[in-house]
């Protein structure tokens, strides 16, 4: 997949069919007032991303070094601010 194409919302409205077709092969970033607002991608790319979002890892998927790092890890001091949520 190539890099995203950027297009203004007004241009997208004028030639939406063109950008729907382009989104099948590359992301189309739709801007409004010069700021990126929306990204249009193909259904296949969306499904691929959703599958990765739900990837489940088992302990066997980690190396011993990674497991050791997890075992000795601790939250940063800033996380103390959320301790009251444990009482809910």
Image (cartoon, grey):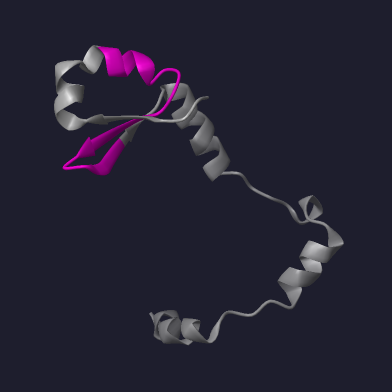
* Residue sitting at the far front: 34
In which image quadrant can residue 28 be found? top left
83 relative position to 36: left or right: right
- For the point 55% across and 36% down, which residue is it? 51
77 relative position to 16: left or right: right
Image coords of residue 2 (percent x, y):
50, 25
Q: Is residue 14 above or below residue 79?
A: above
Q: Magenta span covers which residues?
A: 18-38
- For the point 76% across and 71% down, which residue is it? 69
Image coords of residue 65 (percent x, y):
83, 65
Most foreground residue, 20 or 9: 9
**For the C terminus, which image quadrant?**
bottom left
- For the point 78% across and 55% down, which residue is it? 62
Image coords of residue 41 (percent x, y):
39, 27
Find out whether residue 79 is within the magenta segment: no
Find out whether residue 28 is within the magenta segment: yes
Most foreground residue, 33 or 72: 33
Q: Is residue 27 above or below residue 77?
A: above
Image coords of residue 70 (percent x, y):
72, 70
């Amino acid at each position: 997949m190539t890099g995203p194409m950027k297009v203004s919302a007004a241009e997208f409205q004028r030639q939406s069919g063109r950008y729907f077709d382009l989104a099948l092969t590359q992301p189309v970033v739709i801007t409004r007032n010069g700021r990126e607002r929306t990204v249009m991608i193909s259904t296949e790319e969306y499904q691929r991303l959703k599958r990765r979002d739900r990837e489940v890892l088992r302990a066997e998927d980690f190396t011993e070094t990674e497991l050791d790092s997890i075992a000795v890890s601790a939250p940063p001091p800033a996380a103390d601010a959320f301790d009251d949520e444990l009482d809910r």
